[in-house]
Image: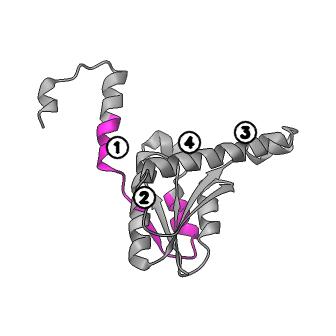
Amino acid sequence: MPRVVVGATGTLGSLAALHRAAAEARVRDAELWVVLAWQSPGGELGSRNGLGPSVPAECRAAAVGRLREVLDTAFGAVKPGVTLAGLTVRGTPGAALVDTAREPDDLLVVGTGPRTPLRRFVRPSVARYCLAHAACPVLVVPPSPLQADLDAAHRRNFWRIPLDPRELAG
């Protein structure tokens, strides 16, 4: 059976990608695989330096809990209308998604978050990684229109700019 694989983090961008992936799965009569990637504190190097066996187990349990929260936020009581599989994968997000969507008839759906120059430097783009390495088609979903409004509200709060009541009457 064909699969639609999508990454989930809980951000607005990943929720938009998750809803688009569910729509694609319905159209293609495919299973929806939702992937949440996780890493131990300090990455792979930190896990080799004696954190103990319980730390990775705790991190995985936290990832499973986070995935349940994301799916509840995305769908709530309304189910997506397709077979849904949640998967937590230890690794970086791009590699986890590419490894999961390894069949040529899979569809990999990824979201794009806001890509400021600082974020590009600190955190590489998962969408670019997937486009470069995936063995299947990749659908890149643009950021939610709400993301720009949210970013503007954060900037306004950071700089303590008062809200203009005329903005609310839009």
Question: Which mark is first along the chain, 1 or 2?
Answer: 2
Residue assigned mark 4: 122
Q: Amino acid at mark 2?
A: Ala
74 on left or right of 59: left
Q: CA distance from mark 2 to mark 1?
A: 13 Å
| Three-letter code for the amino acid on which mark 4 is drawn | Val
Image quadrant assignment for residue 23: bottom left
Stretch in magenta: 127-151
28 to 47, vertically: above or below: below
The type of residue carrying mark 1 is Gln
For disc 1, the marked residue is 147
Label 3 and label 4: CA atoms lie apart by 17 Å
- Give the number of the mark in front: 2 or 1: 2
Per the image, label 1 sits on a secondary structure element best described as helix
Local SS, label 3: loop
For disc 2, the marked residue is 17
